[in-house]
Amino acid sequence: MKERQTVFFVYRPRTIRDLFCPHLPERERDYEVAAVISLDAVDYENVSEDLLVDRAFLGAYASLCRTSPIFRCLLIRQRGRDGGILILPEGEQVRWAAYLPP
């Protein structure tokens, strides 16, 4: 049986640092990855440092995502690295995001 995957999602975070807040384990949400988007180092840093900017690539993948029954989201990561940022977009904007450790 596949192990349950959960992380803590933050509503409309500004930067990746907002995703590292203390939380209760019961506030973590189940998730699955709908698509993986690998970015070069500069683009990944730009996304992680300003999550509130509209991003066309989020809009292109938004139809793959949903909040129910589990968060089906995008994994944005730096090319060649594991982990990254799980994003549940609303159009071209980040609605929910979570840090996924490597």
Image (tube, helix red, strand yellow):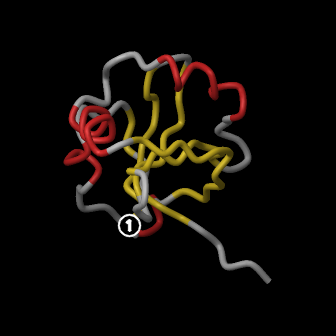
What is the secondary structure assignment of the residue under circle 1? loop
Q: As displayed, is residue 61 above or below residue 30?
A: above
* Residue 5: percent from left, percent from top: 59, 68
Instruction: Tell me which corner region of the image, top left, top right, bottom left or bottom right, holds residue 100.
Output: bottom left
Instruction: Tell me which corner region of the image, top left, top right, bottom left or bottom right, holds residue 81.
Output: bottom left
In the shown orientation, is residue 52 left or right of residue 58?
left
In the shown orientation, is residue 3 left or right of residue 82?
right
Q: As displayed, is residue 16 above or below residue 80?
A: above
The residue labelled by disc 1 is 101
Q: How many marks?
A: 1
Please state which of residues 90 and 74 is positioned toward the viewer in this rendering. 74
* Residue 98: percent from left, percent from top: 41, 50
Q: Spot the residue most to the bottom.
A: 1
* Residue 1: percent from left, percent from top: 80, 83
Please state which of residues 30 and 101 is positioned toward the viewer in this rendering. 101
In the shown orientation, is residue 31 left or right of residue 97?
right
The C terminus lies in quadrant: bottom left
Which residue: 53% across, 36% down?
Answer: 88
Q: Amino acid at mark 1?
A: Pro
